[in-house]
Image (cartoon, rainbow, N blue to C red):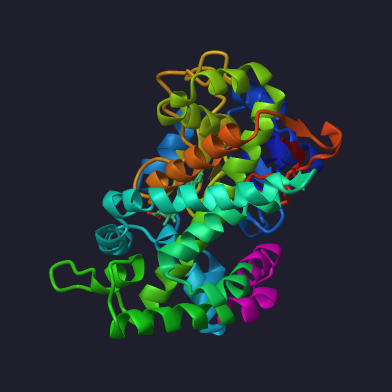
Amino acid sequence: MSKVIETLQKTNLGTRQMLDDPYARFADLRANQPVSWATAPGLLQGKGGYLLTRYDDVMTVHSDERYSTDVLKNSPAGKFIWLLPPSLRMLAQTMVFKDDPDHKRLRTLVHKAFTPKLVATMATDVAKIADQLADEVAAKREVDLVHAYAVRLPLAVIATMLGVADEDRDMFHTLVEKMGTQQGSALRQYPTARRLAKLFEALIEDRRIEPDEGLISELVRANEGGDRLSHRELVSMVFLLLLAGHDTTANLIGSSVLALIEHPDQLELLRTRPELLDTTAVEELLRFTSPVADGAARFATEDTEIRGIPIPRGSQVLGSITSANRDEDHFDNPDALDLTRKPNRHLAFAFGIHYCLGHQLARLEGRTALATLIERFPNWELAAPRESLHYKPTVSLRGLTTLPTRMY
Ligand code: HEM
């Protein structure tokens, strides 16, 4: 370990304290040592990396091209990628882990399919799904809102967008949930990833034979100057949309419901002014909950420096979105939940070339999920002591494991 790293404060992002309530630690680091050192189980290749806690620095690593997300190119493990079975190799080769120009090529092609117009056409479906799930919530006295609602809504939305047949939905849900619980272990994930890849291949094949107006047909059709997505890129893109789109949105919905239960004045405000969901409320909930806690680690591709701390070439750098979204230099009273906050330039969807491709869909789902619950249930209560609630042990994504509630 270099002399400089030895002098830096160390934070293990995977401790129960950091998962459940990291805010005091991040505030202290922002004030006293904005560039420090993080370790995280299953992240940063077990070696640790520089931890950035200030808003401006997180923006810098997300937008300065000297910081790369390309794990295969920058990490020694990348040389052995060919050892992985194709369905797992695909997950490491999505555009999140590519720099320009490879990233730009994939993003341009998917952009032709995943358009704001396509997302807008989903509004009715999303409302219908939210309403059906709310019926099930209403039928129970007590419910774990994470599993009964927050997780199922984005999964049903993406299944609808991909055109997964009704009879395959249960299998699809089971496989996706299984992938989630197997996170961090490529070997355990392999059989599940393979079955999902097979399902996607069949969907793509069907749409090649019989195109429609849906997302997969648009991805098959997407064409830029004669360039198209290869078959493998298509499967990998569908995987990415599924994996990037469901846990993240589920985290937003689950954490937002808890935040509102804990801030009854803000919940009351939403009941009296539901139109805030279309303007400032979801933005504030995105800032306040940061469903993606830090995004992908970046690799320094040359010797750089942040706030006078040398970052040697090859080091990994993690920008904490959770911390940036509470930076007092950018947000007044950052620990307060203020559903009317404006301006609110949060980094929940990151910044720069990897800015969330699904942000419109995520906003639509977040808005509809909360509007439905507010409309259907005048009373929201926790059905378990607050201290029994915990966040999942996934360091890069932040979401509740369960949320026992009474909604009536
Ligand atoms: C509340 C929900 C969501 C949040 C907070 C979120 C957040 C993020 C963040 C922070 C990144 C950048 C990661 C990085 O730079 O390391 C990202 C990328 C991405 N997101 Fe989202 N996301 C959400 C929902 C969705 C949805 C619904 C989809 C699509 C179905 C989606 C698709 C993507 C894709 C494809 C990327 C990669 C973009 C690229 O590399 O150019 N996300 N998201």
The foreground one among 109 and 69 is 109
Image quadrant in which the C terminus is located:
top right
> Is 261 situated above or below 216?
above
Q: Quadrant of residue 360?
A: top left
Answer with left or right where residue 398 lies relative to residue 340. Answer: right
Q: Residue furthest left?
A: 225
Total labels drawn: 0
> Is 301 situated above or below 270?
below
The foreground one among 125 and 242 is 125
Q: Does residue 356 appear anywhere in the picture?
A: no
Residue 171 position in % (x across, y down): 62, 75
Q: Residue furthest top?
A: 332
Residue 405 position in % (x across, y down): 76, 39
The foreground one among 2 and 177 is 177
Identify the residue at image location x=39%, y=62%: 95
Identify the residue at image location x=85%, y=37%: 384
> Is 222 situated above or below 125?
below
Q: Main secondary structure of the magenta part?
A: helix
Q: Quadrant of residue 84?
A: bottom right
**Which stretch is magenta?**
174-194
Q: Is residue 28 magenta?
A: no
> Is 250 situated above or below 289?
below
Residue 303 position in % (x across, y down): 44, 47
Identify the residue at image location x=58%, y=76%: 193
Q: Does residue 379 appear anywhere in the picture?
A: yes
Q: Is residue 177 magenta?
A: yes
Identify the residue at image location x=67%, y=51%: 136
Q: Quadrant of residue 73?
A: bottom left
